[in-house]
Amino acid sequence: MVFKKLLGALGVGGPSVDTVLNGGAVVPGTALAGQVLVEGGTMDTEITQVTLDFVARVESEAEDVETQGTVIFHREVVGGGFKLTEGARFAIPFSVGVPWETPVNEVYGRQIGVSLGVRTELAVAGALDQGDLDPLLVRPMPVQQAVLDAFAQLGFGFKSADLELGRIGGTGQTLPFYQEIELTPPGQYAHAIREIELTFLGSPGGVEIVLEADKRGGLFSGGGDALNRHVVGHADAAGVNWTAQVDGWVQQLAQRHR
């Protein structure tokens, strides 16, 4: 892989940096491994710190105006404190933990439109510069996959996925944003529900599942939103009839009135 970005803040002849991630998608709660490759320029350089940032493209809304921005949701120092001689190459292997609440963006081998990346920051003699983003692919944990499989078995269709700046009250959310996966209902639910927004909040103990339904209005009742929360341990991913479980959750939402 070619080196991606010359550190212009250091002037012509400065070092260049590239981060190579080990192939394939990762899972929240596991480790991301790879190497940071640094190549010396035309002069000796003191590398004081090498940092990896996990970043996400997040939507925010204010006064009915929707904007997007980049949010750093995890940062880890992976090296530094060495002298890089002219033209030398230096490799820094790393293994960093993937936060439990990291959004998923690859489901059934397909990307679902959520932009995540790993950005490398090099500190040289007090100056900072950031390398290009390396795409980060994250696939579901077993509990998340089981719930998504159940929705698919029930006939729900995938509509979209995005990241929303803000917090869901009453949950154990720790990141400054949350993921919404929008699902469209099959015929047996379509009379009561327009769509379901699914949010996963992972933790070392399990996954908090937040379901919000956009309900249709009826002759004697208005529409609106209904919301349910469920906590499932990681060990419960196997041995549960997830289709029946999720069907019960959806029926609760369809029947709930606010």
Image (spheres, rainbow, N blue to C red):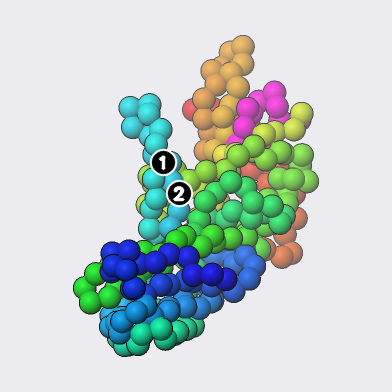
Whether the residues at callouts 2 and 1 have beta carbons within 8 Å, the answer is yes
Name the amino acid, label 2. Answer: Arg
Residue 74 sits inside the magenta stretch? no
**Residue picked out by circle 2:** 57
- Mark 2 secondary-structure assignment: strand
Residue 248's spot in the image, x, y percent?
68, 43
Q: Residue at x 62, y 32 (%)?
A: 195
Query: From the viewer's perspective, is residue 119 above or below residue 148?
Result: below
Q: Residues within 10 Å of mark 2 (few under 14, many from 20)?
A: some
Query: From the viewer's perspective, is residue 246 above or below residue 159?
Result: below
Camera-nearest residue between 207 and 230: 207
Residue 143's spot in the image, x, y percent?
64, 60
Counting labels gives 2
Q: Residue at x 64, y 55 (%)?
A: 106
Q: In the image, which residues are magenta?
A: 188-196
- Mark 1 secondary-structure assignment: strand
Q: Residue at x 59, y 67 (%)?
A: 26
Quadrant position of residue 39: bottom left
Residue 68 is tagged as: 1
Residue 107's spot in the image, x, y percent?
67, 54
Camera-nearest residue between 125 and 257: 125
Q: In which quadrant will I find the N terminus? A: bottom right
Residue 103 is tagged as: none
Residue 82's spot in the image, x, y percent?
32, 87
